Image: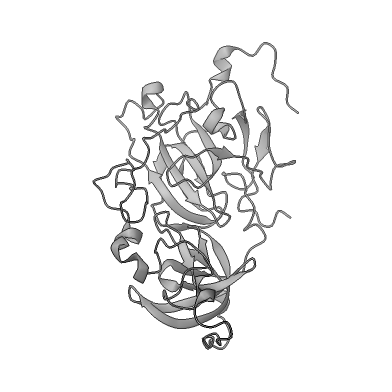
Amino acid sequence: MFKRWQALSLVGLFVAACADADLFSQPPAEADADVGLPIWADGLVWSSEDAVRDAADDSETADATELDDAAPGQGADDAGPPDAAPPPPPTPPTGVPPDCVRVRVLSTGGIGLNVRPDPSTANPPVDNLPDGSVVDVLSIVEGQDIEGTTRWFEIQRGDTRGFITGHWAECMGPPSPTDDVFLLPFACGQSYRVTQGNNTDFSHSGRSAWAFDFSMPLDTPMLAMRAGTVVFADGGTGPGSPCYSGGGQACINDANYVVVSHADGTTTQYAHLNRVDVSVDETVSQGQQLGLSGSTGWSTGPHAHIERSDACGRAFCQTIPIDFADVPGGRPSEGDVVTSQNGCGPTR
């Protein structure tokens, strides 16, 4: 394990380091009166005067749509006499296309996608899939029209089996060997030093305790560590801004960033970007370029700040540990030089 030199100066600790643990802190969300959802305005600023994204536009008719706020449960089991025969299952098509053996839940604005016992909204949901979730497809059937889409997917998630509307899901092919792991966020074969690891005395503490900083040149391509859906993105800090090439604490909320939601219900964040190349609701594959590294916001030099969180409905949440499949032991320490296998092919 790398040991910090005794003579390391205080200045050295600040090279390519992030802001403090309150990086990108934002005011709490207000609740929508109908469905209790956070309201996120176009500028990624919390506001009660802006509408929820398209997924919740028709919240007043939530009971008649797939994106309702009903609590998941087995309510359908209580209907009718105990010996009543269940409704006949839908007739599946002959086979499932190779490019649709799985589906990914699109961005619903944080509501999640309900899993129904049949291809309609008539019965209470039995589960709810977070944005970006990937599940196996058992069959493709016709069902209730949801905003112009009559295609429903019969899916399997653990012990839960049910149906989701195709309006909020997209087809995927078979998984690749690295679909369910995280890889370093730079190109295959590139090596960079960890300038700040986890639980440090500088800024990786509290909310940011499990973050990593990598020192790298300006405009280094930043790649998705895992496939998912872009749920937040802000590239508004550009040339001419006092926070574009690094700034003090006043720049804490001016860093450019991208947040990607993954099939396991977690998100990854990529901050201090010089340029953002993706947009909200865009589906990204592992290794896809999200933007270029930079020094925007509260930063002392070009670097990449990355972290993983449980989804909380906003851009930056409490961090959780992240293990990289292309790092021996999974988690590097401050001072380690790590080499990416992102885009190189299977890592296991």
**Rendering coords of residue 58 (x, y %):** 29, 63
Residue appearing at x 46%, y 70% in the figure: 124
Query: Where is the N terminus found, in terms of image quarters?
Result: top right
Q: Nearer the viewer, residue 337 or 42?
A: 42
Residue at x 40% of width, y 57% of height:
281
Q: Is residue 46 visible?
A: yes
Residue 107 lies, with reference to residue 173, above or below; the image says: above
Name the foreground residue: 55 vs 230.
55
Q: Is residue 38 above or below residue 220?
A: below
Q: Position of residue 308 (x, y in %)?
A: 56, 42
Q: Residue furthest front?
A: 81
Report the label total.
0
Q: Residue at x 67, y 37 (%)?
A: 338
How is the model colour-coded? Answer: one colour
Where on the picture, by quarter, is residue 67?
A: bottom left
The image quadrant where one finds the C terminus is: bottom right
Q: As rendered, which of 295 and 75 lies closer to the eye?
A: 75
Look at the image and tell me whether residue 219 can be seen.
no
- Residue 250 horizontal/vertical position (percent): 36, 23
Q: Residue at x 63, y 56 (%)?
A: 180
291 vs 86, nearest the viewer: 86
Identify whether 196 is placed above or below 161. above
When the figure is inspected, residue 8 is found, relative to residue 324, above or below; the finding is above
Task: Residue at the far left: name it.
Answer: 49
